[in-house]
Image (spheres, rainbow, N blue to C red):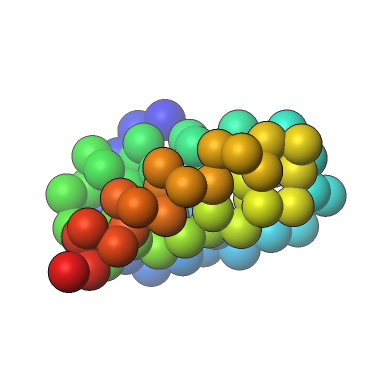
């Protein structure tokens, strides 16, 4: 995934990923969005992407992985 041009592009990618059903494909999309948001380098985008990843993990078979992105989001917010 290439870096996003701005925060709006991160939000649009999240909305597009929200159209997918919950499961591993949606979680993989959220991980790609997070990677792109990290390349953008703006904490707001990274936090949005992390919280989206938390939601994707929460409603998938990977619910046990939810704590790591949630803790990262809290640390950025602190």
Residue drawn at the location 61% of the way across and 58% of the way down? 55
Residue drawn at the location 16% of the way across and 49% of the way down? 41
Instruction: Say whether residue 44 is left or right of residue 8.
Output: left
Count of picture labels: 0
Indicate the position of residue 20 as horizontal and vertical percent values. Answer: 77, 50
Indicate the position of residue 49 as horizontal and vertical percent values. Answer: 42, 54
Q: Is residue 1 visible?
A: yes
Instruction: Say whether residue 49 is left or right of residue 4.
Output: right
Residue drawn at the location 74% of the way across and 52% of the way down? 59
Location of the N terminus by quadrant is top left
Q: Is residue 28 above or below residue 72?
A: above
Instruction: Say whether residue 40 is left or right of residue 16.
Output: left
Instruction: Say whether residue 39 is left or right of residue 32.
Output: left
Q: Nearer the viewer, residue 60 or 5?
A: 60
The answer to which image quadrant residue 47 occupies is: bottom left
Residue drawn at the location 83% of the way across and 49% of the way down? 21
The answer to which image quadrant residue 23 occupies is: top right
Residue extending furthest toward the right: 21
Q: Is residue 28 above or below residue 66?
A: above
Q: Nearer the viewer, residue 29 or 61?
A: 61
Q: Is residue 25 visible?
A: no
Location of the C terminus by quadrant is bottom left
Q: Is residue 77 above or below residue 58?
A: below
């Amino acid at each position: 995934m290439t870096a996003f041009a701005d925060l709006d592009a991160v939000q649009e990618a999240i909305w597009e990923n929200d159209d997918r059903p919950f499961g591993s494909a949606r979680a993989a999309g959220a991980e790609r969005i997070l990677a792109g948001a990290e390349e953008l380098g703006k904490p707001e985008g990274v936090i949005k992407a992390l919280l989206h990843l938390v939601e994707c993990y929460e409603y998938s078979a990977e619910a046990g992985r939810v704590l790591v992105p949630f803790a990262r989001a809290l640390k950025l917010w602190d």
